[in-house]
Image (spheres, rainbow, N blue to C red):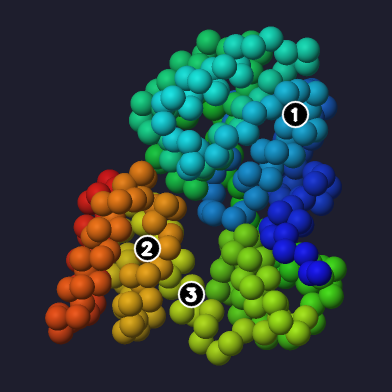
Amino acid sequence: MKEHTLWTEKYRSKTLETYITTDEIRELVEKYISNNDIQNLIFYGPPGTGKTTLAKLISINLNCDYLYINASDERGIDTIRDKVQGFASVASFKPLKIVILDEADYLTTQAQASLRNIIETYSKSTRFILTCNYIERILDPLQSRCHAIKVIPPTKVQVAEHLVKVLELENISYDLEDLKIIINQFYPDIRKILNSSQIFSKSENKLSIPQGKLVSNFYLEKVLDELKKNSKDSWKTIRQIIADHEVSDFEELFHFLYEKVEEYSKGNNALIIIKIEEYIYHSNFRIDKEINAMGLICQILEIIK
C-alpha cells in the first residue's frame, strides 16, 4: 500500500546541515547552539519558506524543553495564560525552556499583550520564538522584546534541486517543463510547491500537470493569501488578481472560500458561510458576476478586519 504522508512533513529538514538558508542565519543559529541559549526571536517572511522548520531545528539542537503552539488554531488569551504561562512557570531539569508560537500574527491583541508580560516575567528561564508572515501584525511592544529576523527564501535553483531529490526518492518521473511550471507558479512557497507536486504525482508514478489546472488553482491561493493579510488595500489587490487571471467562473471561487473558511475567518466561520450562501444565491440573478463576487470579498474583509 502506498504511503500517504505529506511530503512537506516527510522531507522537512531534520538537521541544520540539510536546511537551506543564508550564511548569516546559519552562522547565527550555530552560535545559539554553541552557547546553548538564544534571544527571544521573531522569524518573519513569506509563507512556506521554512520559518517553522528553523524554529524547531533550534529547539531540538539545544539542551532545553520546548512547547510548540500553532497560534492560527489557538489565538486567544486563554492559550497564553494557560498553556504558555503554565509551561514557563513550571520548574525544569534542563537549563532552558523555549516556547514556539507558530503563526503568531494570528494572536489577538489581548493575547499579544499578555505574552509580552509573560516574556518579561520568565526572562531568566524561558525564551520565545515567534513565527509570522506579516510582522506588522505583531504589536510594537512585543516586537521590541524580540530580535526580528527575516527568513529569506531559497533561490529557485535550490528549490528545484530539493524538489528533484524528493521526486527521485519517491520514484516519480518528471519533465523539466512541469518542474518549471510548478516552481514559477508557487515560488517562494516551498510548502505549496511540494504539496502541488504530490497532488499531481498520484497516478502512474509521474509528475503530470493537466493543462490549465495549476493556473486556476494558483489564483485561488493568491486570493486566500490576501484574505489572510487583510490590509486596507486587500480588496484592490484581489480585484486585480481576478482581472489578471481573467476569471469568469466565480462558482469555483465561492466553493474555495467555503472550503478554506477556517484559514482566514478569525473565528467567524458561521457568519462568513452564511454570506457565501447569500452571494451564491445572488449570482443566479446578477448579470455582472464579478461585481457580485467582489461584493462577497468586501463583506468577508469587513467581518475579519
Q: Nearer the viewer, mark 3 or mark 1?
A: 3
Residue most toward the front?
1
Q: Position of residue 68 (x, y in %)?
A: 62, 33
- State yes or no: discs 2 and 3 in contact (Cβ < 8 Å): no
Q: Which mark is residue 258?
A: 2
Q: Position of residue 236 (x, y in %)?
A: 27, 64
Q: Earlier in the sequence, mark 1 or mark 2?
A: 1
Q: Callout 1, which amino acid?
A: Tyr
Q: CA distance from mark 1 to mark 2?
A: 43 Å
- 189 with respect to 138 (left or right): right
- Pointer 1: what residue? 32
Q: Residue at x 64, y 73 (%)?
A: 199
Most foreground residue, 60 or 141: 60
- State yes or no: discs 1 and 2 in contact (Cβ < 8 Å): no
Q: Callout 2, which amino acid?
A: Tyr
Q: Is residue 182 above or below residue 48?
A: below
Q: Neighbour class for label 1 at 10 Å: few (<14), some, many (≥20)? A: some
Q: Earlier in the sequence, mark 2 or mark 3?
A: 3
Q: CA distance from mark 3 to mark 1?
A: 40 Å
- Pointer 3: what residue? 217
- 160 with respect to 136 (left or right): right
Q: Position of residue 72 (x, y in %)?
A: 48, 42
Q: Is residue 111 above or below residue 276?
A: above
Q: Secondary structure at mark 3?
A: helix
Task: Please identify the quadrant where the N terminus is shown.
Answer: bottom right
